[in-house]
Image (cartoon, helix red, strand yellow):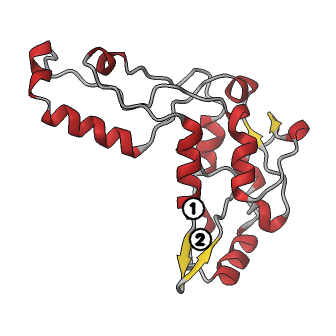
Amino acid sequence: MCKHLEMPFVFGGTKCCWEETCIDGWDARPVAQRYIWAATNDGLYSYSTDGQSYNAINGPSFTWKEIWTALGEKFGVEVIQESAFSEEFWYSKSLADKQEGWKEIVAEKGLVQTEMENLANWEFLDVLFRCPFKLLGTQNKVDRLRFTVRVFLSPIFTHLVPSLTLTAKGAEIEPIISGVNVVTA
């Protein structure tokens, strides 16, 4: 949507969420590996796990400020550093009247007819990026049990963003972004 309507690619939220690690990143591949490891590791139960649960995160976290420019580049939108962050930008307000722009994209790209409000929960992003506390976990328990798989976030986004390419009518279509509906890879 940003690219189609030539809108700025802006992160809307608190300065804390922009500059500090506030949300864990994860990738389904190491999460799946962790579950397979736990299910097939007979020795795991000798460590007195007593049915405890384990966080499924990748370890090293990120800040949106660190990755925003790279996300913009992957989606082919310009990121203007001075205005990439705004506490006044609200996804739900900014995208509320963009349904016609989405219909144009659907028609131009030959996509399956989808209503824009079914793409993302913009109100959720507004709340998530303004959350008054950090949403962070730790994988210390599985580290102590010798689970060693790690995926650093830069490669996660490099892997995930190209995989967002859609195929319609047999043609490759570039990734489409509406606001910031990426994450949380």
> What residue sits right under mark 1 in the picture?
119
Which residue is located at x 82 percent, y 40 percent?
84
Residue type marked 2: Glu
Residue 184 in sight: no
Q: Position of residue 172 (x, y in %)?
A: 59, 76
Which residue is located at x 30 percent, y 17 percent?
141
Label 2's element?
loop
Q: Relative to 112, does residue 15 appear above or below in the rendering?
A: above
Q: Position of residue 167 (x, y in %)?
A: 53, 76
Among all residues in the image, which is located at the extreme right? Answer: 82
Which of the labelled discs sits on residue 90, or is there none? none
Q: Cβ–Cβ below 8 Å for labels 1 and 2? A: yes
Which residue is located at x 71 percent, y 45 percent?
70
| Of 65 and 88, the residue lying toward us | 65
- Badge 2, how many Cα within 10 Å: few under 14, some, many 20+? few
> Which quadrant holds residue 15?
top right
> What residue sits right under mark 2 in the picture?
115
Q: Position of residue 111 (x, y in %)?
A: 58, 79
Which residue is located at x 60 percent, y 62 percent?
117
Q: CA distance from mark 1 to mark 2?
A: 7 Å
Residue 10 in sight: yes
- Badge 1, how many Cα within 10 Å: few under 14, some, many 20+? few
Would residue 153 appear left or right of 39 to someone viewing this image?
Answer: right
